[in-house]
Image (tube, rainbow, N blue to C red):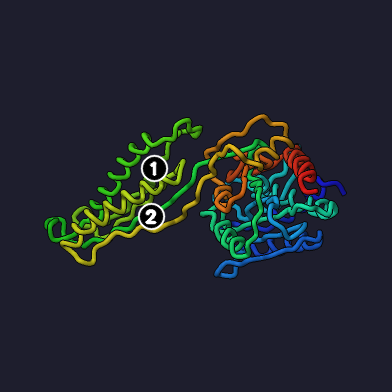
Amino acid sequence: MTFLPRTTDLLGELIAQPTVSASSNLTLMSLLADRLDSAGAQVHLWTDDTGSKANLFATIGPDTDGGIVLSGHSDVVPVTDQDWSSDPFQMVERDGKLFGRGTCDMKGFIAAATAMAPHYAALNPTRPIHFAFTYDEEVGCFGAQALAKSLKGREIRPSVCIVGEPTMMRIIEGHKGCYEYSTHFTGLEGHGSGPDLGVNAAEYAARYVARLLELKDALRARAPEGSRFEPPWTTINTGALVSGHAHNVIPGKARVDWEMRPVQKSDADFVKEDLHRLCTHSLIPQMQAVFPEAGIVTEVIGEVDGLQPVTDNEAREILQELTGANGADLVAFGTEAGIFQGLGMNVAVCGPGSIEQAHKPDEYVSLDQLSQCLGLLEGLSAKLV
């Protein structure tokens, strides 16, 4: 059996597992673990606190530092209210394309990497090749963050990571981070005719949003010189301000949902420190002067570091050699790459399919893209022996 039929057969099995982020991925991970174990890999499955989600980390080759990681996330986004031409969890081939939820984002890469495992094992590699498959990327990269802790705890130190997100096999060397928050305001309800007797949570939330807007403008001046990001500075977006239930009632609760996309970690620190000063030195004292139990609490939904472009990057250099590309690009969407970079690895993103297909009905990956991916992964053999 050649690599492509083996890959498409496995991809069909993976698509049949509806691993939306709200569901367990254990059956899918068990399937992958069996395939990798049969190929001779040393396989570890690490579950989350609920026991319903697992990360997989497998190794072919010696127990040494400096290995190459092939990384992908197992979860997919929901299909609720999407108009599909066929069952999204039964892969269908039409016109050289494989349709199904997760075909490009990103079970196609996972299937290709796993299908190559017997080939890598037959090489008897002197440099380890690792497989890192995670949970809950789509809702905050929680699996990759847990995996990073597991690798640190076991002192596993790969040096290169290829994240197989759909890039049409273009090499990506950078993207912004994604930090998401919900800031909760607790005030004191009262009648609208006596505003000084209550603590209007909506008004304090509005003042908080006003500072977010000021910071949004201030971040433009902090854009790194020569930044290749678009836009080149860190951005802030206010997604929602929720409060109140009647015209004549002072709202006692409010919530602001917001995010920032840092081009550098120092910008995230700048924003968080400024907002902390605003709350602790101004807003909260004013609120508690009327109602001592008033307060402001920011809930961290997710903090995922970006992938920072660097001058020396073995992952990028390997991919350029194998694809013949002369350069590497930056993208707007986020990945788990920054988490692996934070572990000291050289990281690049490159995988089959288009991000334009991800999350949409009739998601697909083309057979040509899978073939290109398999060609790259086969070429990677030369870096293992």
| Residue nearest the viewer, comparing 205 with 132 | 132
Q: Amino acid at mark 2?
A: Ser
| Mark 2 element type | strand
Q: Would you say residue 68 is visible in this rendering?
A: yes
Question: Measured from the top left, where is residue 117 in percent x and y?
Answer: 78, 54
Q: Position of residue 332 (x, y in %)?
A: 52, 38
* Near-viewer residue (150 or 251): 150
Residue 362 at least partly seen: no
Percent of width and height locating residue 186: 27, 61
Sequence-wise first label, 2 or 1: 2
Q: Which amino acid lies under the numbered mark 1 shown in the image of this protein?
A: Ile
Residue visible at 16% across and 56% down in the picture: 192
Q: Quadrant of residue 104?
A: top right
**Separation of marks 2 and 1 at Cα, in angstroms:** 13 Å
> With 267 as the anchor, is 351 left or right in this view?
right
Q: Is residue 32 left or right of residue 167?
A: right
Q: Does residue 234 appear to the left or right of 94 in the view shown? A: left
Q: In front of the other: label 2 or label 1?
A: 1
Q: Can you identify the residue that label 1 sits on? A: 236
The residue beneath circle 2 is 182
Residue 355 coordinates in the image, percent (x, y): 60, 40
User: How many numbered markers are drawn?
Assistant: 2
Identify the residue shown where x is 55% and y is 39%.
309
Q: Secondary structure at mark 1?
A: strand
Q: Disc number at residue 384? A: none
Task: Examine the rendered structure and indicate whether residue 184 appears above or below residue 165.
Answer: below
* Contact between labelled residues 1 and 2, with CB atoms less than 8 Å apart: no
* Residue furthest right in the image: 1
Residue at 24% of width from left, 52% of height from top?
A: 204
Residue at 20% from the left image edge and 66% from the top image edge: 292
Q: In this orientation, which residue lies closer to the viewer: 208 or 234?
A: 234
Viewer-proximal residue, 35 or 330?
A: 330
